[in-house]
Each structure stands twice: as C-alpha cells, then as structure tokens.
Image (cartoon, grey):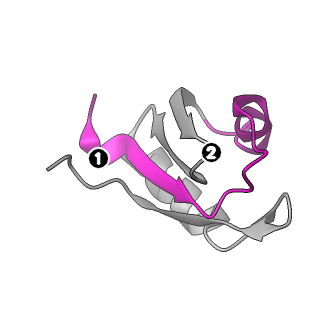
C-alpha cells in the first residue's frame, strides 16, 4: 500500500458507515476504506497519489452528515 495514495479522513459523524464514504467518493477510484466510525475517523486508499491529492483539494472542509470533514495525507505509522 503506497502511503502517498492514502488519506486520513476525520471529524466524521459517529453514525458514518462505509457505504456513506463510498457514496461520497463515487467519482474517485477508491482501493480501500478503513473506518473507525466510533472514533470519528478513518483511512482511505486511492488508485494514485494524484487522486488522493484531488480528494484532499475537493473535499477537505466540506460538510458531510452534519460535520465539516478534515481530509489530509495519512502519516506513516509510528
């Protein structure tokens, strides 16, 4: 899994389901979604780093299920 094509998505509504994220990102090529909805965040991997950058540009700060999303490059595990 390329770290460059993975993003962090935060400030999620705790009721958010993977299907909600798939709907939100339907115009992008999503490889995987790993949600921790009970904690309000998750990680999404895209097909290319460019697509991950586009999602950050397009959707960071957008209201989704009543909350303003925080989307940024995922940092490597420590």
Residue 2 appears left or right of 15: left
Q: Tell which of 18 and 14 is nearer to you.
A: 14
Q: Position of residue 16 (x, y in %)?
A: 75, 44
Residue 15 lies in magenta, yes or no? yes
Which class describes the residues within 10 Å of circle 2: few (<14), some (14-19), or many (20+)?
few
Q: Which residue is mark 1?
A: 4
Q: Which residue is mark 2?
A: 38
Identify the residue at horizontal 40%, vertical 38% (top origin).
48
What is the span of residues highlighted in magenta in the rendered image?
1-28
Q: CA distance from mark 2 to mark 1?
A: 26 Å
Identify the residue at horizontal 69%, vertical 31% (top origin).
18
Q: Quadrant of the N terminus?
A: top left
Q: Quadrant of residue 38?
A: top right
8 w.r.t. 29: above or below? below
- Which structural element holds mark 2? loop
Identify the residue at horizontal 66%, vertical 66% (top origin).
69
Q: Position of residue 4 (x, y in %)?
A: 29, 47
66 w.r.t. 44: above or below? below
Residue 41 appears left or right of 72: right
71 w.r.t. 27: above or below? below
């Amino acid at each position: 899994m390329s770290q460059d094509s993975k993003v962090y998505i935060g400030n999620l509504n705790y009721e958010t389901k993977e299907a909600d994220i798939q709907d939100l990102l339907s115009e992008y090529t999503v490889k995987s979604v790993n949600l921790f909805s009970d904690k309000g965040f998750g990680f999404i991997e895209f097909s290319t780093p460019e697509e991950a950058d586009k999602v950050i540009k397009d959707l960071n700060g957008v209201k989704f299920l009543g909350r303003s999303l925080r989307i940024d490059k995922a940092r490597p595990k420590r």
